Amino acid sequence: MCNPNNQGHIMIIGIDDTDSREGMCTTYLGALLMEELKQYGNIQKHPFLVRLNPTIPYKTRGNASIAIVIETVHSDKVIAYVISRISTMAAMECEMTNPGVVFIHDHERELIKEVLCTFFLKAVRDVIAIEEAKTIISKFGLHSRGFKNGRGLIGALAACGAVLNPDWDQTFEYLAYRQKEKWGTPRNVDKRSFFIADNATYPATWDTVDISNRVVVCVPHSPDPVLYGIRGENPDIVKKAAEMIVSEPIERSCIYRTNQGTDQHLISIGSISEMKEMHSYIVAGFVSNDPFTIAGGHTFFSISDGSGVSLDCAAFEPTKNFRSLIRRLIKGDFVKVYGSYLNNTLNIEKMEILYVAPLVVSHNPDCPSCGKRMESAGRDQGYRCRKCGTRSSTLVHKKIKRDIEPGIYEVPPCARRHLAKPLIRLREQSAKIFPSR
Ligand code: ATP
């Protein structure tokens, strides 16, 4: 990034909320700016794409915001250029689109670092009022611009905080964008090539395809400019996978540094009673009612813990085969659930089964003389064989083998949320911490 002929100061540009469901995508604007801002300085290679609280109702799709880092001697020109690009590119006509952009200058970094690092994590895990973002901006005199109600300032500030905080688990995504004339039309991609790319690069890439459901998951269906996105551990591997994709010609691509696949949104808590709406948790409890499935295929069960509060948990229809695991739970199993808490229900992303309760079924005894199943002899009178008259006083209890085992389980890639850490990452990371000998 350092160019001795063009030594300027480093500026962070955080941007959010420029898109609508009908089109555009803040990451596309970021990819354009990565090229267009080159006229003003040197741009750090991989811009930031951060996913914020997945339960926020204002989100268009995946609650993403972006940040670009540039070294420039023309900061005023950069600011004017970015603001004018947002004004023309953002889907302003959409009521839900309220763009925001924040610029952090070199001299502000140290002063604001701690505040913004905290703000970033808060935006991933908590719910923030626009006023809180505006107060930080005015208190520190940050250069910013909010359009319409300015809600995008929340995500824009959070993305700047992500840049200033080096200590989070980072992953990468190669985003390929469609040529403009193709936007809104069906995407022309060779599905087989995604399976080949996945085969060549998994587990260093993930969520390109869903093998068990036989679907490509990295190609969106919305009318936005994204053709596909390959997620992985480092820039080289996502690029390698992308080079194997056969598709319509792309307009441009960009490799973003992200918090996707990291579980950064999850808050570990000791008791269900601590849960608040629109937050995401890891919490443990005993299964307190047997799972049931409603019309539409959504499966529910409840857990409870010592706090006396119970929690409804859901595996919705899109989680496909994961629901068959849920249906095998019984009262008394001890599980740890991971997911977002919305409308009084935890939407499960992962589940760890810690204890499998014994399943005991009871039936009338068999007659010791003639082998026939005995019948009840009347209330509190034990059992009697109809054939030979033999009597018995006790019911027979039989332990049935359960068809689930302790372990950690996840929803399939086709149902994975952007922030949820795939188990393969969890395993690879713990293998690094505890290498096998
Ligand atoms: P896409 O994924 O297509 O880029 P999106 O899903 O990112 O779209 P946005 O259009 O950015 O959705 O809308 C999300 C809005 O919610 C933004 O204005 C953002 O500032 C705001 N927001 C993000 N996180 C929080 C939070 N934790 N609390 C309150 N508001 C938030």
Image: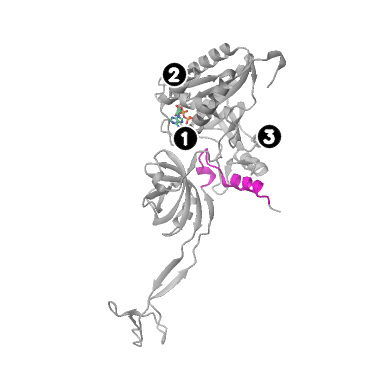
Instruction: Give me the C-alpha separation between circle 2 and circle 1.
Output: 21 Å
Instruction: Give me the C-alpha separation between circle 2 and circle 3.
Output: 37 Å
Q: Residue 201 in the image: x percent, y percent?
A: 66, 41
N-term-proximal mark, 2 vs 3: 2
N-term-proximal mark, 1 vs 3: 1
Residue highlighted by disc 3: 236
Q: Which mark is residue 53?
A: 1
Quadrant placement of the N terminus: top right
N-term-proximal mark, 2 vs 1: 1
Could you say whether the residue bearing mark 1 is in a helix, strand or loop? loop
Confirm if mark 1 falls within 8 A of ligand 1: yes
Q: Indicate the quadrant where residue 258 lies.
A: top right
Query: What residue lies at 46% left-to-right and 41% top-to-bottom?
Result: 280
Front of the two marks 2 and 1? 1
Residue 429 in the magenta stretch? The answer is yes
Whether residue 305 sits left or right of residue 248 in the image: it is left
Q: Indicate the quadrant where residue 218 lies.
A: top right
* Mark 3 nearby-residue class (10 Å; few <14, some 14–19, many ≥20): few
Whether residue 80 sits left or right of residue 288 in the image: it is right
Could you say whether the residue bearing mark 2 is in a helix, strand or loop? loop
Residue highlighted by disc 2: 147
Quadrant placement of the C terminus: bottom right
Q: Residue 370 in the image: x percent, y percent?
A: 41, 86
Magenta stretch: give its range: 411-435
Q: Is residue 182 visible?
A: no
Q: Is residue 111 visible?
A: yes
Amino acid type of the residue tagged 3 in the rendering: Asp
